[in-house]
Amino acid sequence: MIYLDYSATTPVNEEVIDTYSKVCREFIGNPNSLHSLGVKAKKLIDASTEQIAEILGVKTSEIIYTSGSSESNNMAIKGVCFKYQNRGKHIITTELEHSSVIAPIQYLQKQGFEVDFVKLDENGLVDLEDLGSLLRDDTILVSIAAVNSEVGVKQDLKAISEVIRKYPKVIFHSDVTQSIGKDRIDFSLLDLASISCQKFYGMKGIGALIKRDKLIIEPLIHGGKSTTVFRSGTPATPLIASFAKALRLAYENFDLKYQHVVEIRDYLLSKLEELPVSINSNSYCLPHMVNISLNHIKSEVMLHALEEEDIFISTQTACSTGDYSKAVYAITHDKERSTSSLRISLSYLTTKDEIDTFISVFEKKLKALDFRRDV
């Protein structure tokens, strides 16, 4: 099997599985319980939270555990808008956001909130001048992902933050799901940030919302004691402990891993440039993603053709809906390219041999599908 869909989800690191299994066996108490088993579990959660906070450069009190980035995005967006709607009902976002950002914003539109989409330049970067012109006294939230999940465009969070800070009451949220473990994030630039553990070789079903300490939001889930007043429910001790382990492992030998991905990406691009495809990713994209478009071949047809050979890539993000990539269209303004796009996502685990095999099979499939179309 050749797996090239790491941006959708990652295989769980064996050490993370070991941690999860050990905690399941040895820390059976409810962390909210007052007896010794509960105290033991709570101490482990506190130690895990301290480790996560240290790695990310945030306070332990700023970490809210969630089920993943979709919940974190919903909590951030709805939590801010319901809490501060007395200030205004204006939201700013981009066309490059994940569906778990766009969907709650569309829901809020039905509740009377107004939404503006900031313009993007030819590289897919936020137009800072347009962002400044959209900000108003009644703007309460700006939500812009650090890295787009389909093409891989990496936004300049520092520059965006400097524009937003001219309006001190505006809250800046970023979905940093595709960044953690791949890039370094300065959380001091943000008021809220969404994270999912499954993107950095951790367990599915655990994530976090990083919330600036003094910021108050309306909870999505009410009822019962937990690690924070902003998200009720019994803390998932094994998942939280394995979260800390996965994060620590993700940032070990970080520079070496990153350089390996750059080399693999460049090698892949050199091979793709010889084939009849359009490359949608650019120099502003994180190297872990390469988005391409085919000529007159539907992306799903190619995806399943590669799957027959045990090679796995993706079309849009795994959570997307619709028959074309909104992110590719937002950058290329080409409907055909947006309906035939494929995302190849790489990892420090990806090898040149895997790329060679992928390219060989991919080229054969291109010729076969082109022949079938012409017959």
Image: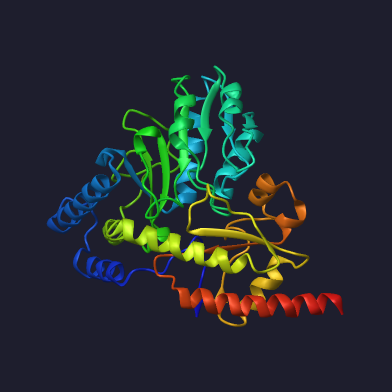
Instruction: State which quadrant residue 131 falls in.
Output: top right
Instruction: State which quadrant residue 280 falls in.
Output: bottom right
* Residue at 60 percent of width and 43 percent of height: 124
* Residue at 68 percent of width and 78 percent of height: 365
For residue 41, above or below residue 359? above
Depth check: 276 or 110 in front? 276
Depth check: 325 or 351 in front? 351
Q: So how many labels did they put on this image?
A: 0
For residue 28, above or below residue 55? below
**x and y percentages locating residue 363 in the rendered image:** 66, 76
* Residue at 19 percent of width and 67 percent of height: 26
Residue at the farthest right position: 375
**x and y percentages locating residue 158 in the rendered image:** 43, 33
Instruction: Please indicate whether residue 303 sits to the left or right of residue 355 in the image.
Output: right
Instruction: Please indicate whether residue 57 sits to the left or right of residue 262 in the image.
Output: left
Instruction: Please indicate whether residue 139 sits to the left or right of residue 58 in the image.
Output: right
Instruction: State which quadrant residue 200 falls in.
Output: bottom left
Residue at the farthest left position: 36
Instruction: Please indicate whether residue 284 sits to the left or right of residue 305 in the image.
Output: left
Depth check: 102 or 283 in front? 283
**x and y percentages locating residue 325 in the rendered image:** 67, 54
Residue at the farthest bottom position: 309
Q: Is residue 230 visible?
A: no
**x and y percentages locating residue 346 in the rendered image:** 48, 64
What quarter of the picture does the C terminus occupy? bottom right
For residue 217, above or below residue 328? above
Residue at the farthest top position: 137
